[in-house]
Amino acid sequence: MTKIFSAPRAALLAATFLAACDAPSSYSGDVLEEPIVVVEAAPSAKVSTTIAPRPLPVPVPSHQGAARRGVITAGDIDDALNLAAFARYQAKSRKDLKLPMANLATPVLAQLRGADGKAAPGVRVTLRKPGAAEPFYSGYSGVDGMISVFPASLGAGRLREVELRAIPDGQGAPMVQQLRTGQRAQVQLPFNGEWAPDFLDLAFVVDTTGSMADELAWLTKELKGLVRQAKRAAPGVDIRYGLVVYRDDGDAYVVKNYGFTKKQSQMQGWLRAQSAGGGGDYPEAAARALASAAGMQWRSGKGERLMIHVADAPEHDHRAKAYLQAARNAAAKGVQVFGLGASGVGPEAEYLMRQAAVQTGGRYMFLTDDSGVGYGHMEPTVSCYRVTALSDLVSRVLRSELSGKRIEAAPSKVVRTVGSYRNGVCVN
């Protein structure tokens, strides 16, 4: 698209990403919640391309506070916690938009709990087809010990059962358990799990068409705050920063990939070198940018691999499959994609970005109109969410991933609630 934001809005949005990182080191205002475990009876719980769409619940707003004027507001949806609703949305959107659909059939859904009964994030797990010698998936349990893996998306096909192996940190034999796909399982481990990531690889993928100069300037200015935030959430974590910028065919460039750096000064230099321009039509080169970012030298092992994709325009229709393939490539490396739908985002961009997020273990974030900043924003196709300042949302997402515990907004920071929201789960 020609531009993501008007100039003042661009500055504000970029500031919120990194101003979130200047938050005080005490997080007593936030709420650590045990997530609702969704146990859905088979066969209706199975995520399948054959699920018949039915009308989504109509969101009912509940105003709880007032947004500060000039402060960008946002909400988010964790579709991995709401897979039945997402399957209906996905099937309907595919029909309406004539765009491809990621194969999320027969998901592996589980929550690991340690011997102490607490959620067990950061446990190394592998998944195998029954009787297979090698796993088709190797990774770590996520926030609150959750596992959401899509075998079909990873090329393993539609499976009725998988073999889960949970491997203790240090010496000890793996725990082996058979899981049925398509329903959430509770897995009790004979050992405890704690999440203390060794590293954080954090990459920004940013559309630089149009009026993005102020955003880039704010990002450069606030980079030190991002460093402080990450270190508070996970003391001692080793941080690398990555940057991919993109426009579209016919512009001065299509995709620029700067790779990763540990040097804050180098990242700032990359940002200072950017200028905003180009575009002209609605779709942009999002697929090529996401593929380039997924192909970066992400570290393996016990760490966080987070990609934040900021955009308000989708990929061209004929490259939509390539966008979903790029997300699959990211998932295979354990990279989580967090999309941010900016002002002007439409149904096509939301559809593609949400699919990228759910199959990689990320979330879809979206701006709202509550603060009256910038252009109007499309209402997301979700039945529940909470609105807070974008800086608060980004801060909670980062801290949740780094701590292994889902962090909900403090009541005083919630501007309004839409629908029946319960710890990321829509119960309406």
Image (cartoon, helix red, strand yellow):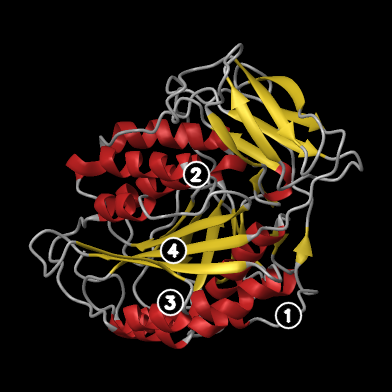
Q: Which residue is mark 4?
A: 203
Tag 3, which secondary structure?
helix
Residue 306 spot, x, y in % from top left: 51, 57
Query: For this view, does 153 lie left or right of residue 192?
Result: left
Residue 323 spot, x, y in % from top left: 30, 44
Tag 4, which secondary structure?
strand
Which amino acid, by three-letter code, is at mark 3? Leu
What is the number of the mark on residue 360? 2
Q: Nearer the viewer, mark 4 or mark 2?
A: 4
Which amino acid, by three-letter code, is at mark 2? Thr
Figure quadrant of residue 57: top right
Q: Are marks 2 and 1 in contact (CB under 8 Å)?
A: no
Specify few, some or many for label 4: CA neighbours under 10 Å numbering under 14, 14-19, or 20 or more: many
Of the two numbered discs 4 and 2 on the same chain, state the one appearing first in sequence.
4
Q: Which residue is mark 1?
A: 25
Where is 345 relative to 336, above or below?
A: below
User: Gap between marks 3 and 1, in whole Å?
Assistant: 22 Å
Query: For this view, does 166 lie left or right of residue 202?
Result: right
Q: Which residue is at the front of the view, 21 or 312? A: 21
Of the two numbered discs 4 and 3 on the same chain, state the one appearing first in sequence.
3
